[in-house]
Amino acid sequence: MDEKLIINTDDLYAYMKEVEEGGKYKANIYTCSSGVPTIGVGFALLIENDDKWSIRENLFAIKGPLDKAGITLPTELDIKRIENILDNVIIELENDNKNVAKKIVEDNATILNKLTITATQAKELFKITQAEYEGYLINRLRLKAGLTKDKAKEIIKSLSMDEKIATYSCVYNALTLIGSGLSNALKNYIKNGISEKDKAYYKTEAWYEIRYNSHKSGWKYIDGKEDKKAEGDDGLANRRYKDSLKFGLYGLCNRKQQNLNQATKDGILKFLDSNQGRNNKNVTETIKKYENEFSPSNNDLGNKKQVKIEKILGILRQDPVEQIKTEVEGKGKFLDNVSEEFLKKYDKEYGLILDTERPIYNSITKIEEHTDVLIFPLMDRLVVNMQKEEEKAKGKDDELYKSIKEFINRCKGILEKVIVELGGYKKAGYKRDNNKDLTNLELKKRLIAAFKPQQFNSPDTKKSHEFFKSFITEEDKKKEQAKKEKTKQKAEKRMAEKKNNNQKSGVAISNQDSMGDKKEENKTDGWIVIQKIDGTKYMSRKEYYG
């Protein structure tokens, strides 16, 4: 990536090629849905600024964008003819005659086709103009939000990669899309020290500006100023939906929502419930009005996976804990008060999503198939079982390992807060409130061990540890003692058997030693014949062996 550029070119080009040309490039001049003559991957030959159109500066000049991309320029005569055609298109665009502008391009295809480019040149042309459009983006932010150039640049740099690409796509589509509404929303969104709720509010505002409030011709039809949709309006709506999806609203647009804590939900809803819509109307009502004519789920718009605002509001306003309670009761099971408080607090701090791919809801659906949803099996799945997964990932997948560890610590931390808020809850209080008990000794032991307070990089679990320990009964202690005695007896028996085997081995070794001594004695008895150089000699074995 060029050091001067803010956005990664490869990521940006891949997205722009998809939204501009469906993943392909155009070798010859064509018109986009707005009637603007274009080539390659959305490279507009005309530029609009403050409702005025002009031919792109230095378009056909040596060292201009086409020349820099290695594109062979037409002859001077052909360039003049092309520029005359573009001037005629400008007149029609400024008179809002989009269809006439398109026809001019179609009727003059022979002359316009004197300019042609390859796929490689299309990408190079895109790269050359990226800095130019980033400059336009910065300048629009500067003008519309009353910022310095450096501050406007800082705002773009502070956005996520997807947010950068989405805002770039807007300015690439039309400079005027970066208006005061979007510019001020972005300015507020990246403020230092902003609360989670306010951050969600301004992100939602920016998303709304891209998705609904930037389709000028579409609103003319919606407001009754035009009898019918302009040609290309559905295409523009499609583009706005795609760009707003790229900018993102926490995955709410396509049912891939993230865990949303209460502060984030409150921020989103605060904007949607505000009167920041068109003509100071309610935002949600403004959105519904737009979606009635340009539905994000309309097959013609190519956005089957996107949902309407009612679905988004339903997700934001649903109480996942109440829904879980209803499901559990529907299966004839019971949700204990500790689990309920745990779920409420987890939802408030981190957000609960009723998706069986998520560990908490997955665990609840598995538990309720067989038994009541009590805190004991729930923590066994969310903490004890996850600790096993954490161990498997250790040293093999650092990202997964950290993710699991963070989740375990969240669960431990939330349960600790619940137990503390319940007054240092123990067995007596739990049984009184739920008429339930924990009788599985092995489960008790697992939970006691899992919630044993740790010194480093772990939340405080003192009270929850005491809570689980309080379920150990005298009978449990006797069972454990009996188990220890049995284990001890087995160990003593093994030791005795080993000692006995060692003693037997010792006798055998002693006998072997005795035999060896006798052999040594036998070896020194009698005489031995020794062959020497000077002849044969007899020696006693004792003398020979020493």
Image (cartoon, grey):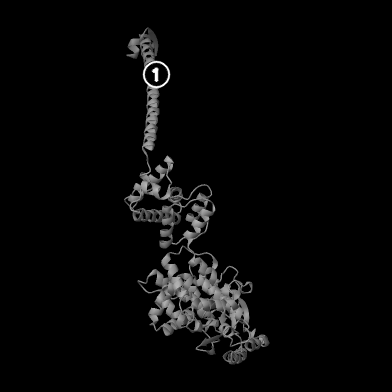
Number of callouts: 1
Q: 126 above or below 525?
A: below
In percent of the image, x 45 and y 70: which residue is there? 160
Quadrant the C terminus occupies: top left
Q: Nearer the viewer, residue 449 or 135?
A: 449
Quadrant of the image occupied by residue 116? bottom right
In the rendered structure, the answer to whether residue 209 lies left or right of residue 294 reads: left
Q: Is there any visible trace of residue 208 in the rendered image? A: yes
Q: Nearer the viewer, residue 112 or 254?
A: 254
Name the kind of residue labelled 1 in the image: Lys
Q: Nearer the viewer, residue 535 or 196?
A: 196
Quadrant of the image occupied by residue 217? bottom right
In the rendered structure, the answer to whether residue 396 lies left or right of residue 17 reads: left
Instruction: Give neighbour class at mark 1: few <14, some 14-19, many 20+ (Cα, 10 Å).
Output: few
Residue 251 horizontal/vertical position (percent): 50, 67
Residue 3 horizontal/vertical position (percent): 43, 73
In the rendered structure, the answer to whether residue 23 lies left or right of residue 417 reads: right
Q: 497 above or below 393?
A: above
SS class, disc 1: helix
Q: Is there any visible trace of residue 57 in the rendered image? A: no
Residue 382 horizontal/vertical position (percent): 45, 51
Residue 449 horizontal/vertical position (percent): 38, 45
Q: Which residue is mark 1?
A: 504
Q: 390 above or below 206?
A: above
Q: Nearer the viewer, residue 433 or 97?
A: 433
Q: Residue furthest top?
A: 526
In percent of the image, x 37 and y 26: which residue is there? 492
